[in-house]
Structures are given as structure tokens and as C-alpha cells.
């Protein structure tokens, strides 16, 4: 496993914002396939997250919180 995977495993959960270099994404997706990391896909306003397999609930909670924050910001702009 490379430094990006180790970094996420040490931190527990990492949100992906914007673009990720191809080599880094390959490393992370390889770790997901090997079971070293978990991944929550981007879904609408929910951002993408990579996480340590033991931190799945924390990742789900953070993803939901980020989506709610985005909705709140949009509602202020549109109101």
C-alpha cells in the first residue's frame, strides 16, 4: 500500500473534493478492491469518501452532514 492509502487508514475518513490525479485514484481503488479501504460513491450532493473499514459509520455520518450543509447553503441562495 502506498502513502495515500496509509494516510487515509491513519486518519480514518477522507473526503474527496475536486479532481484526484489518475495515479492516486488507481492506488485508492486498488486498496478498495483489496479490502484495505472502503469507499462511499458521490451521489448528488453527497461527496465521495474513502475510509478505514472500521470507520464506515463515521464516513456515512460525515457524508450525510456534508449533503445537509450543501442543501442549507443552496436554500439560502435560492430563498
Image (cartoon, helix red, strand yellow):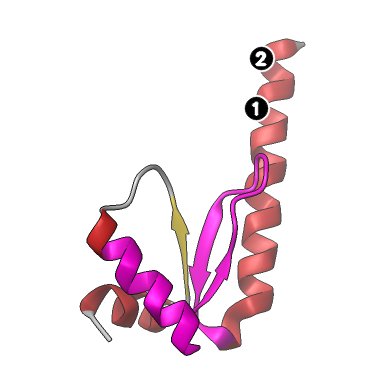
Q: Residue at x 68, y 52 (%)?
A: 65
Q: The N terminus is located in which quarter?
A: bottom left
Residue 26 - label: none
Q: Residue at x 70, y 19 (%)?
A: 76
Badges 2 and 1: C-beta atoms under 8 Å apart? yes
Residue tagged by mark 1? 73
Residue 36 visible in the current orientation: no
27 over 66 or under it: above or below: below
Which quadrant of the view contains residue 23? bottom left
Residue 3 in magenta stretch: no
Would you say 59 lies left or right of 30 here?
A: right
In the image, 14 versus 39, the foreground residue is 39
With respect to residue 77, does 49 lie above or below? below
Please tell me the numbered disc located at residue 77: 2
Q: Is the residue marked by circle 2 packed among few (<14), some (14-19), or many (20+) residues within 10 Å?
A: few
Q: Where is residue 60 in the image (x, y as percent from the top left)?
A: 68, 66
Q: Is mark 1 on a helix, strand or loop?
A: helix
Relative to 20, residue 51 above or below: below
Work out whether residue 77 or residue 50 is closer to the camera in this orientation and state it: 50
Residue segment shown in magenta = 24-53
Amino acid at each position: 500500500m502506498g502513502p495515500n492509502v496509509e494516510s487515509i487508514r491513519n486518519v480514518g475518513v477522507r473526503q474527496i473534493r475536486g479532481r484526484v490525479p489518475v495515479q492516486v485514484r488507481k492506488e485508492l481503488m486498488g486498496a478498495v478492491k483489496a479490502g484495505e479501504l472502503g469507499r462511499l460513491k458521490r451521489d448528488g450532493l453527497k461527496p465521495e469518501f474513502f475510509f478505514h473499514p472500521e470507520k464506515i459509520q463515521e464516513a456515512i455520518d460525515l457524508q450525510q452532514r456534508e449533503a445537509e450543509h450543501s442543501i442549507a447553503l443552496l436554500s439560502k441562495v435560492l430563498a
